[in-house]
Structures are given as structure tokens and as C-alpha cells.
Image: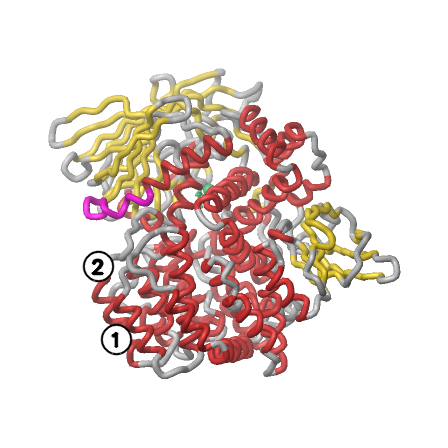
Amino acid sequence: MLDVQAIAHPPLAPLAAAGVIRREDYTPPDWQVPEIALDFALDAAATRVRATLQVVRSSAHDQPLVLDGGGQTPLSVIVDGVAINDWRLEGGALIVPLSGAAHVVETEVEIAPERNTQLMGLYASGGNLCTQCEAEGFRRITFFPDRPDVLSVYTVRLAADKARYPVLLANGDPIAAGDLPDGRHWAEWRDPFPKPSYLFALVAGDLVANRATFTTMSGRDVALGIWVRAADLPKTEHALAALQTSMAWDERVYGREYDLDVFNIVAVDDFNFGAMENKGLNIFNSRYILADADTATDYDFDAIAAVVAHEYFHNWSGNRITCRDWFQLSLKEGFTVFRDQGFSADQGSAAVKRIEDVRGLRAAQFPEDAGPLAHPIRPDEYQEISNFYTATIYNKGAEVIRMIATILGPERFRAGTDLYFDRFDGTAATCEDFVASMEAGSGVDLSQFRLWYAQAGTPRVTASLHHDTGSDRATLTVSQRTPPTPGQPSKQPMVLPLKLKLFGAQTAQTLAPEQLVLLDQPTEHIVFEGVGERPILSINRGFSAPVVIETDRSAADLAFLSAHDDDPFARYEAMQQLMLDTLVESAANGTADHQAVIAAIAGTLDNAALDPAFIAEAVLLPSDAFVGDQMARVDPEAIFRAREALRADVGQRLAGRWRAAYDAAQVDRFEYTPAAKGLRRLKTVALGYIAASGVDDAAGLAFAQFEGADNMTDRQGALATLVAGESPERVAALDIFYNRYGDNALVLDKWFQVQALSSRADTLATVEELARHRDFTLANPNRARALIGAFSANQRAFHAADGAGYRFVADQLIALDKLNPQTAAKMIPPLGRWRRFDEARAALMRQELERIVATPGLSKDMFEQASKSLAG
Ligand code: B3K
Ligand code: ZN
């Protein structure tokens, strides 16, 4: 159904070749740096950094030493103890002529952390100093070969004012500390594990720690610390527990043990993304650390555990084995996401976790793969690597690892990962190294499977089942096709692991048990014998392959699967397909028969054997955006109307059931357990349908939930319901929320976000006003994302026919780019989806992209995203 329609437009001039980095151009570094000593005289306005590098020529060549830089000028350059003058700067890099095989090179620079608004390198946040180096931030701290295949042992000395920065942390283990004259103090840290510069970190600040000990499987004690502002200490219990659970899980599931004597995590408020896996000193966006029932939702609690686990797991998949170059990013990210997904699945409902992960993939990665920024999980080229921390690298990357695990089975997969960790420990490896280890450890040939690393685009699979009653034989015909993507006009067939099962339409019996088929041809036929009644196809069970499936299954067959399939994902999927088909028809024709969806939802609500957490996911309608993805041309208003009509009908026709579900889901007291979470989720989903039904007391019910809640999940759920409506309670609840939480930045983000996501017709006006609110700032990435990012995910409001939504977002991104290019560029993709819309909207979106590209002083980050979005 999805068909990206090309709209004629004049071709854009080819991108300047000079700024493009290509995977095929990789060459090993000319110089290695086995040891580095760093000496920081820390100060927010002016920090002095002295770096002492032991450099070793890698091969017989006559190249000078090239140290990447980030705009600094060296105060001094000393080679083997002698100051030199014949260095030069070239494109920010420091070129040092050297004659021998090994030298000691010292440089000194001065940097200004408090003026660092990009939040890359050393910067100030909330009065503390911290770093972010991945991917290329280290060069903004000191001159260094800032590439992941240069591994060094780091010794770091930090000195700072003791009253202002009483805590001084760096990677590795603490070696020594002491006081200095003038109220200053110092600390020295050493990390014995060679690491690339992107894993360097330091923190200096007024912090306290929630501490614990973890005893590893070989009996070593590790001192754990979660460092936060003193007032936030009570909100660190969940993260600390998640860390301990993660450490034990990685030992049990992957045989990976922690290696240093300390493991510290620091929470900071200003952070470009979620968190960072610096060796022994993870630095986190505070939203992925701080939680208590009053301020964090269940979603937040789950995300905290997942991100803590993810960063911890990087200690092996990322740090002990790092990436040879940034084209290999998915080597650490795809694998680590797969690992954190497995961890989260083990903490609660694996079925609900899988549903959430697939929903996320479809919301972020499928559109990326179908649009102008599509790239393989191992890209071939980039201009700015920060733009490649994408859903494709992370989430499709994880799906690719999941397929390997599915094809190999658990024992052989573990043999493969053991071999990989063993072979490549202490090195900078490639995706190919990983796949080769999987093959060698399992004995399974993955030659054709490697196409998943090279080809972009989401494969589309059509499946049609034919039953021959005479011979009791069913034949499934399956065809695959991967659409063209930028730079890849034609594709080869992929290896698709599809889990299949057949059910009897009359008896609901299993006619063919679940089997895994590996498709590797454009079209294949799979024959099932002994099929004595009409079979119903359950396909891609568990979402075993990250593909789009198109079948000719009727609404009745989907309804059957939604009631009888024993694979929870397939059951959810059948329901979603039923809803999607109904919504697409209704958006196209202005009306559709809702009966099949209503009956399926009723059946799901009535099924006492189902877990409330699963029911809540299964009865939710697909998002506006996902409905749009099924249409040849997205019609935001028609989709909105279709979805509202279906919601109202489901709400009214099942009114009694929603009340019953709502009442049954009341819990006495907040508990963070899978069962209590499931009930809370179902409660707010039911509240949404009650409100959609239009009954008089809906706003009162929501307001009562809002006021009476002893937890943020219930409170935010009720607020979101109220904010979508017109009731007087809406304004009251927003005011109460603001007054209650106005001094808590993370909760205030929710206040901004819930309004930006509202489906009301006046959302743009509200958001424009919020952008002028005294609590709004583009300088804090969480706040910028809460308003601008959320608004551009609001299909109805962002795609207002007059283009005002596009103009607002472009204005904000142009302003943000001057402060923080990385965060601004991440919010370009919604504007790049112009091909999916009608010509008028497409023209308005292009106009904004063109305005962005033409902005004087635009960053490389924004230029790459915006110009590719225009060209695609
Ligand atoms: N590795 C970091 C992401 C760095 C992003 C740099 N633009 C966090 C993570 O994926 O675990
Ligand atoms: Zn990661």
C-alpha cells in the first residue's frame, strides 16, 4: 500500500564532495598513542589542558603526526622535552613533524567550558563541569588523533576549586588525591584498559553519591556510585537497582564480568541524547536516572532501567571491543540495543516489550528507511557522523542481531558471541568481524545475510496462502522486494527469517506447528501437507524479520487471529492490521464499517486469560502517523477524522466494558511491578476511550484521576486526556500541574510536551506561545525536544495546511543550530518527509528546507540533513 510518490522538482546541485567521508577510504592510523597523560586545571571560564602523548609510528611512512583539534590554538608544543615552532594548523588539526619511530609530544590549550553551548567536549551544566566526547568531542578538549581505532591508556589529573567542585571524577580507578593552596584540590585517575578518545570522561562538581557494592561472578567487589545533586539523591534508588540487575544479567546471559574496581554514573541536566558509556564513568541525561513515583511515569522507570543497562552493557559491546571507524557504529549500538531489549524483556512482560520495540521501530526507523535519509546499518558515507546516530543504526541494527540470534538459536548464538568477545577483546573491530565470529562460533553460513549490513530500505513481503481441498495441501507463496533508496536503485533478495504457523478456520486447531523459514529468493513456495480444513496464516510471528508484510487475509481471518493466535505479538499484529485497514478505508472514503474492530476489542477486553498490560497495547489504535505510512499520500486531516470517529464509536459501543476495565484497574497504592504497571496502563487507555465516547462525566473522571493520583503515570495520563479536550478542567489541570512541578525541570518538560502533542485544532498557537514562555529555552536539549520535537511528531498540528507548523519548526531549528547543531539537526527529518504529502504541503515543506539550507553560517550537521532531505 505504501508508495512513495515522487514529485517533480529541479535537481539540486551535487553535494560538495570534499566534506564527504567514505567507508572505502579507510586507512589505518599513521601513529598510535599507547599512553596519554592529561592534566586539567579546571575552571568554567578558562580551563588549561596539558596533554602528554607517547606516540609510535605505525608503519614505515614519512607522514607527520596529525592531531585533530576543535578550533583551539596550542599555547605550546613540546617534542621529547623541547619546545618546537615548526608545527602548523590545518583545518583545525595540529600537524607536528616528527622524525623518529617514537616520541613524547606535549601540548597545552585553554578552553572555555561555560561558553560551550554545543555540549560536545568539556562543558558546564548546572554549575558542574562534564564532558561528552562521542563521536568527535575529544578534539574540542585537546589535540589528539580523535578516531576510534587509536587506543590509549589514560592517566588523568584534575585540579579545581574545592568548594565549587568538591567531587573530581574521571575514567578508571582513583589513584590519589590531595589539597592544593588557594582552596584548590586535585585527584588522579588511571584507566588501565586501552580506549579510544570518545570514551574519555571527566566530571567536576558539587555532587553526592548513592553507593552500593556489586560482587562479580569471580568474587571481586565493585564500588558503584550514582552521582547527583544532593536534593536528587532520593530519586536514584531505581537506577542503582537497575545497574546491579544489569551487571548480574550480563554475567548470566552473556558471561560478561565487569573489570574495574569502581563504576560511576553521573546525572547532568544538559545533555544531547540519553547517556554515554564512558569507561567506568557513564554520564547520563538526568531524565534517565532520576525517578520516584510522584515525578516519573512507568514509561520513565522502564526507560531508566533500559538505558542504565544499555550503557553498562557497552562496557563489553563498545568499550572492551570498540569500533574500527564510525561506519561500524552499529557493531556496538545495534548489538547493545539487542542486549538491552533482552534485559528489559526479562524484567517483565516479554510480549509487551516486543510490541513496544516494534512500535518504536515502525514509528522512527521505517519512515527513515523509506525517506531521503535512508542508509544501511553500515553506512557507506557521511558528512557529519553525529547525524548517523539513527534509528537505523540502533534499532534496525538490533533487529539484524535478533535475526542472527533467531537463525542460530540460543546455544549457537551464545557460542558466536563468546567467540566474538574472545577474539576481539582489546581491539577496534568491524561489523564483518562480528558476523565472521557468529559464523565461526555456530557453523552457520551468513554470506547472503550480510546484505542486511549493506542494503538500506525495508523489505516488503507479500504472502498468499492457497488451500487445495482435494489434496489437503496448502501452498504459501511468498515474494520479497526492497524498494530503491538514495544511491541504491536496485536491491538483491535478503535472507528473511519468518516464523509461520497455520490455524484451522473452523476448529481453531494448529494445522501446521510454528516453523522458521529462511527466505532468500525473490519468490518462494512453501507447501504444507495434511491441511484438512481452511487454514489461516500466522506470519512473521514475534516480528521475526523487520519487514512489511502484505497478505490477502480477510477481516474475518484477522479477527480470528486476534482472538486465537498463541503468539502474543501475532495476536497484537492481527488487531493492528484490522484497525489499520479500517482507518485507511475510512480516511480514503470518509467512512468505514467499524464492526470488526469493535468486536475484536470487545473480545480482547473480555478475555480473562490475557494480561492487562497486553490488553492495553492490543486495544490501542495505531497512531495517526502509522496510518499515514500505509497511504499512498498522507492526508492528516482525513486520518485525524477517521481515527477520532473510530475512537468515539469504540468508546460508545463498548461503554460498559471501558467503565468495568477502568474500575477493575484501580490499585490501592503505587507499586512498580509488572502487574501494577499493566493495570495503570489499561486504566488510562480505558479513560481515553471513555473521554472519546463523549459522555458528560468524562472530564470529571479524568480530573478526579489527575487530582487523586499517587503517581505520575496516572496523573500524566489523565492530564493528556484533559489536554486533548475542551473542558474547563483542562486549563485547571495544566495550571495545577505547572504550579506543583514548576521547579522540577524533568516534569516541566512533560508539561510542555503534553501540550505540544495535543490533537486540538489550536495546538500550533499554544506551542508558539509556549516557545515564548519564561521556562522555555533552546539551550537545554530536553526542553527543546519536549516542545519542538514533540510538536513535529504531532501529525495533525505540524502538517497544518497553511504551512505555519513547518515555518514555526524551521524558525526554531535555525535558532537552535546557532547554539547546538547536533540537537537541531536531529529534528530535521519530519520536514524531509515531504514526498509523502500532497503537492501543496510538499512545496511548503521544501520551502522551509530551502530556507534552512540558505541560512548563513549553517552548521555541517544541519546542512547534511536538510540538503539530503531536499535531494533524496
Ligand atoms: N554511545 C552514545 C551515543 C553517542 C551519541 C553521539 N552523537 C550513547 C549510547 O548509544 O549508548
Ligand atoms: Zn549505545
Image location of residue 402, percent across then percent down: 59, 43
Mark 2 Cα shell of 10 Å, populated few (<14), some (14-19), many (≥20): few
Quadrant of the rendered structure where residue 670 is?
A: bottom left
Q: Amino acid at mark 1?
A: Ala
* Quarter of the C terminus within the rendering: bottom right
Residue 3 visible, this orientation: no
The count of marks equals 2
> Mark 2: which secondary structure?
loop
Q: How is the image coloured?
A: secondary structure
Mark 1 Cα shell of 10 Å, populated few (<14), some (14-19), many (≥20): few
| Residue 732 marker | 1
Image location of residue 481, percent across then percent down: 73, 56
Mark nearest the camera among 2 and 1 is: 1
- Residue 234 on the magenta span: yes
Q: Main secondary structure of the magenta part?
A: helix
Q: Which residues are magenta?
A: 229-239
Q: Nearer the viewer, residue 217 or 429?
A: 217
Q: Which residue is mark 2?
A: 743
Q: Is residue 667 above or below residue 422?
A: below
Quadrant of the rendered structure where residue 180 is?
A: top left
Q: Are marks 2 and 1 in contact (CB under 8 Å)?
A: no
Q: Is residue 96 above or below residue 540?
A: above
